[in-house]
Amino acid sequence: MYLIVGLGNPEPEYSFTRHNMGFDVINKLAEKYNINVKKEGFDAIYGAGLIEGEKVILCKPQTYMNLSGNAVIKFINYYKIDYSKVIIIYDDIDISPGVVKIRKTGGAGSHNGMKSVIQNMGTTSFPHIRIGTGTPLDKSNLIEYVIGKLTKDEYSILKPGIETGVEAVSLIIKNGIDNSMNIINAKN
């Protein structure tokens, strides 16, 4: 079983923001694979289904970004999920808008949601799917940049990253992390 977690802040207030790219990928996966993500529990909204013939849980933590790891660890502990099958999807300001990068391991950088996940899991060794949102021109107001509402034009630049994020999840499940990194990371 895979646990696929999109990081974000509870919707709808934070929908159409850079910080909710993880939620947007989960929403697209749910739509593509007909998985109903409406159950509430473990500090999250989630649903179970199949992707590439494998049982998955799609998860959107509802703890707000800085405490995302609290929900993640509850699922891991309850369902006894191996860390190699925990896929975390999140926005990354250090990657160009719409570009996606997969990593097998790695730190959180400046991302507080990932810091919480790593702290709760006690490791950095699990699949990361990073959805690029680009760096703001004015770095002094980073919070507004990541949680501010996007215009339709700004969102349209990020949409290819959401689609590639969906593809990345499917590839990891079907072909493993190494092959998926070779395919997705070479795209950009």
Image (cartoon, rainbow, N blue to C red):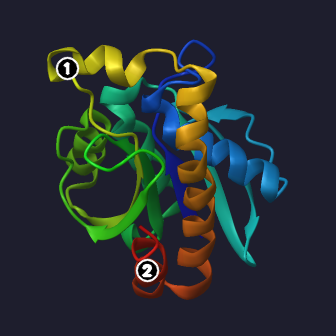
Residue 142 horizontal side relative to residue 52, left or right: left
Which amino acid, by three-letter code, is at mark 2? Ile
The residue indicated by pointer 2 is 177
Identify the residue at horizontal 75%, vertical 34% (top origin): 38
Relative vertical location of residue 28 with respect to residue 68 in this rendering, above or below: below
User: Which sits in the foreground, 81 or 124?
Assistant: 124
Task: Return the x and y of residue 94 as percentages of the image width and height.
Answer: 25, 46
- Disc 1 crowd rating (10 Å Cα; few below 14, some 14-19, many 20+) is few
| Quadrant assignment for the C terminus | bottom left
Asked which secondary structure carries label 2, the reply is helix
- Image-quadrant location for residue 111: top left
The residue indicated by pointer 1 is 138
Identify the residue at horizontal 27%, vertical 28% (top origin): 136
Relative vertical location of residue 84 with respect to residue 9 in this rendering, above or below: below
Task: Return the x and y of residue 1 as percentages of the image width and height.
Answer: 60, 70
User: Which sits in the foreground, 161 or 119?
Assistant: 161
Identify the residue at horizontal 48%, vertical 49% (top origin): 98
Which amino acid, by three-letter code, is at mark 1? Asp
Q: Are marks 1 and 2 in contact (CB under 8 Å)?
A: no
